[in-house]
Image (cartoon, coloured by chain):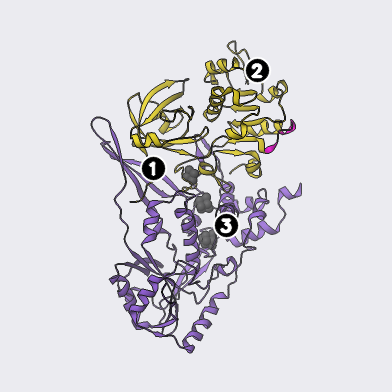
Chain colours: A yellow, B purple
Amino acid sequence: MMHNPHRPHRARIVERIQESGTVFTLRLEFIERDIREHYSFAPGQFNMVYLYGVGEVAISIVSDPKRPQQLDHAIRAVGRVTNGISQLQAGDTIGLRGPYGRGWPMEKAKGRDVLVITGGLGCAPVVSVINYITQRRDQFGKLTILQGVKLPKDLIWRDRFEQWINELNTEVFLAADKGDPTWPWHVGLVIELFDQMTLSDDTIVMMCGPEGMMRVCIHELLLRNIKEEAIHLSMERNMQCALGQCGHCQYGADFICRDGPVFSYDRIKPLFAHQGF
Amino acid sequence: MTRPLAAQFLPHNQLQRLLDTLHHSGHKVYGPQLRDDAITYAPLATTDQLPLGIEDHHAPGSYRLQQNGTQHWFDWLSTPQGIKPLLFKPRETLWHATRDATGAIHFTDPASSAEKIAVIGLRACDLAALKLQDQHFLSVEHTPDPFYTERRRHLFIVAINCTRAAATCFCTSTGDGPKCDVNNSAADIAMTELDSGFIIMAGSAQGTHIIEQLALNDADEAQLNEATQREANAIQQQRSVPSQNMRDTLFAALDHPQWDDVASRCLSCGNCTAVCPSCFCYSEQAEPQLDGSSTEQTREWDSCFTQGHSYMHGITVRHDTKLRYRQWLTHKFAGWHDQYGRSGCTGCGRCISWCPAGIDIIDELTLLSTDKGVADDA
Ligand code: SF4
Ligand code: SF4
Ligand code: FES
């Protein structure tokens, strides 16, 4: 039979790290040496992770591309497959195939200020961007991180945010809809933080999170003269094949698994204002 | 290069020889047969199994067969399914996995099951739809699908030129028929049925090779004239798409009130996507053995009319019929242009005949392109 792109390869769980109540990171390594050594990826790309007898899920790779032999996947236990995967331990075997899609425009971002916006329950795709920049600090301008959550407990990687705050040439803005005594940052809507930021005209924006949040943020950005083509979004849809075949992830004419998941806003703008695509 | 064969004449009583020649060259032959009040493709051994003197009549939500008293085998027009189920199987296994006592997992490909298949009876609209499926499943940009590719490689097609049109046919307006373009389609052989036999033409070297084994005579002028006249009947179609490229029209009409209107009639049953020869969506599932020692990953046709199609962790993106109908129509007639350079509709009319609510996409497209949408009023 010719090459079967549907079939996963075996991978070993090297390490499992609990990040919050529902979020955990799996460090994975392909068992077949040949696959392991030929694998490379870019920030924002994803893998299909397979739990034996249950199914596959699309998971963004959050570790650094210069270390492609061990791949970190931040996973939120929300469904049948991810809940099952959360029960696995270091040493267990799972299935893995990838990488898929087009990632963040890191080349285009070189030398420019970068604004990373995320919302909801921790957004793995942008963590790869932040990690990438902090590892190559001199290649980028100012890094601004904006994150909104509903409740303080929804902020995962809190220790990492606290670390990022202290990075060189980096600003972090956090907002929670409702505060509590553990929350030293802004209480209110995430868009209220835009007035506290200074954005250069040359800022490139990378965001992911609930589409409603991204919509209001885009509105604020355009008001502040950020160009449509400088705004990048990581989109999410039902994904099953990751090969541009099964049709589930179609967004208008684009297949998110292949043409995305990262799109510049000007490309998806005509559909983005409409529900149901 | 083989020299192109002139059009030849195959007498009715020699069609069996064509079937035999295909059998002898190693093909399993599929042809139209009457099953449960419909004409469908099934393995074909003899011409006795073909539907003699039967016409199909189509209307929105209706399909019925009628004897017409002729000795023609191909007076019917469209089968409920075209060739799609023979290439893109309604259900198939993508891979197997086993787990041994130590917990180690192994993945393996399914055994190859491709056999040489010859299909007799496909129409111009079916060939055009096959080209669309080829674009989707064979393209390098989308990773080529090994299962489809293998079956496609082993496929031999005997196409039939239509000599009538149903009330639901509109392939003339989509530019896909009614006559098969034998030099520029997937047809290895194309035939037009006459009262006494067939005009037969080769569309590929393999087609030429098969026809040569039949040692036929060239068709004479009277036979060619009869074919032209009969083919002309098929051009008389009552329906047509408003335009071959509705991309901009539909994307500008996303808030059109007609979507609500059609949604009030649509049952969201997915019949249209199931009979459409170009729809390609499928869903995957894991099917483990009870003892856990092995499991397989299978795929099954899916439809954008199902709830699961747009489901992602707790949210159904297309939660109502209106959004699903809009997805179907905007994908088929708009998005497809960006994906594959043309519309995804080849004018076969199946989705009209097999819609239990009698929804006629031509009517919907016409209303969507003529009325002013809400968005335009702004
Ligand atoms: S949309 Fe309808 S008429 Fe067009 S190819 Fe599909 S089933 Fe046939
Ligand atoms: S999205 Fe709908 S219209 Fe498009 S191929 Fe899939 S089932 Fe057919
Ligand atoms: S996940 Fe199947 S087409 Fe994108």
Q: Amino acid at mark 1?
A: Gln
Q: Residue at x 58, y 72 (%)?
A: B237
Q: Which quarter of the figure is the N terminus of chain B placed in?
A: bottom left
Q: Please state which of residues B13 and B188 is positioned toward the viewer in this rendering.
A: B188
- The answer for how far apart the CA atoms under marks 1 and 3 are is 31 Å
The circle drawn on residue B285 is 1
Residue extent of the magenta highlight: A222-228
Q: Which secondary structure lies at badge 3?
A: loop
- Expressed as whole percent of the image width and height from the top left, the position of residue B34 reads 37, 70
To which residue does mark 3 refer? B341
Q: Which secondary structure lies at badge 1?
A: strand
Indicate whether A107 appears above or below B338: above
On whether disc 1 and disc 3 are found on a single subunit, the reply is yes
Q: Amino acid at mark 3?
A: Gly
- Expressed as whole percent of the image width and height from the top left, the position of residue A37 reads 38, 34
Q: Is residue A225 magenta?
A: yes
Q: Give neighbour class at mark 2: few <14, some 14-19, many 20+ (Cα, 10 Å).
A: many
Q: Please state which of residues A138 and B191 is positioned toward the viewer in this rendering.
A: A138
Q: Give neighbour class at mark 1: few <14, some 14-19, many 20+ (Cα, 10 Å).
A: some
**Does residue A223 appear in the picture of this structure?**
yes
- Expressed as whole percent of the image width and height from the top left, the position of residue A30 reads 36, 32
Q: Nearer the viewer, mark 2 or mark 3?
A: 3
Q: Is residue B28 magenta?
A: no
Q: Please state which of residues B68 and A99 is positioned toward the viewer in this rendering.
A: A99
Mark 2 C-beta closer than 8 Å to ligand 3:
no
Chain under numbered label 2: A
The reply, left or right, for residue A145 in relation to residue B303 is right
